[in-house]
Image: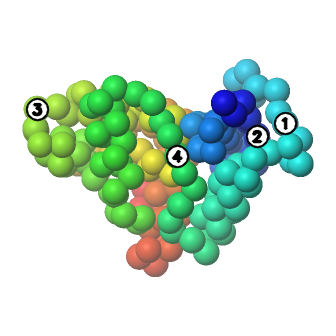
Amino acid sequence: METIVSHIYHSPIGKICITAEDGCITELVFIDENNEVPEMDTDEDLPSVIHQCVDELLAYFSGTSRTFTVPINQTGTEFQSKVWKELYEIPFGKTLSYADLAKKLGDPKVIRAAASANGKNKIAIIVPCHRIIGTDQSLVGYAWGKARKRWLLQHEFRLALGVQTLF
């Protein structure tokens, strides 16, 4: 069994803790100064999956790539996994409302459950929970702050649609 390895990546919108285990990214979460930061491994000790993740994040933030191919593995309930799979399928530069997400899951009444599962996503950006917005097109909660959500959406919209600002 491979050990759990963490690395801090300094993104344009804050520090991101990337965690890998068994050749997959298991967490990619924003951290703030008041968050406890795990002990980091040195660059030379990092597994290739962390290097791949950092390279793909660099490409995402620079605007040269819109997709991620790094292997991920996020544990959760069957319903959470179903929600995360739907999130993963939302195209770059597009958004869905919670109501749309519930319909894609096959039951328009699971809006709150879908929102809860969305909020439990621990692989930010790659599993793009930031692409879920309110039915009225408003920014709604984001585990890592609305300012980051706004930045991510504007970044994607600028690249995908040529629009300067939307929120």
Mark 4 vs mark 2: give the one in front: 4
Q: Residue at x 41, y 76 (%)?
A: 161
| Dot label at residue 109 | 3
Q: Where is residue 43 shown, x and y percent of the image?
A: 86, 47
In three-dimensional space, the C-alpha distance between marks 2 and 1, rounded to whole angstroms, equals: 7 Å
Give the residue type at disc 2: His
Circle nearer the N terminus (1, 3): 1
Residue marked by disc 4: 72
Q: Nearer the viewer, residue 3 or 150?
A: 3
Q: Does dot 4 land on a helix, a strand or a loop?
A: loop
Q: Does dot 2 land on a helix, a strand or a loop?
A: strand
Residue marked by disc 1: 41
Q: How is the image coloured?
A: rainbow
Q: Where is residue 26 shown, x and y percent of the image?
A: 57, 37
Q: Where is residue 35 shown, x and y percent of the image?
A: 70, 23
Residue marked by disc 2: 7
Residue 12 position (above or below residue 58): above
Q: Residue at x 34, y 57 (%)?
A: 90
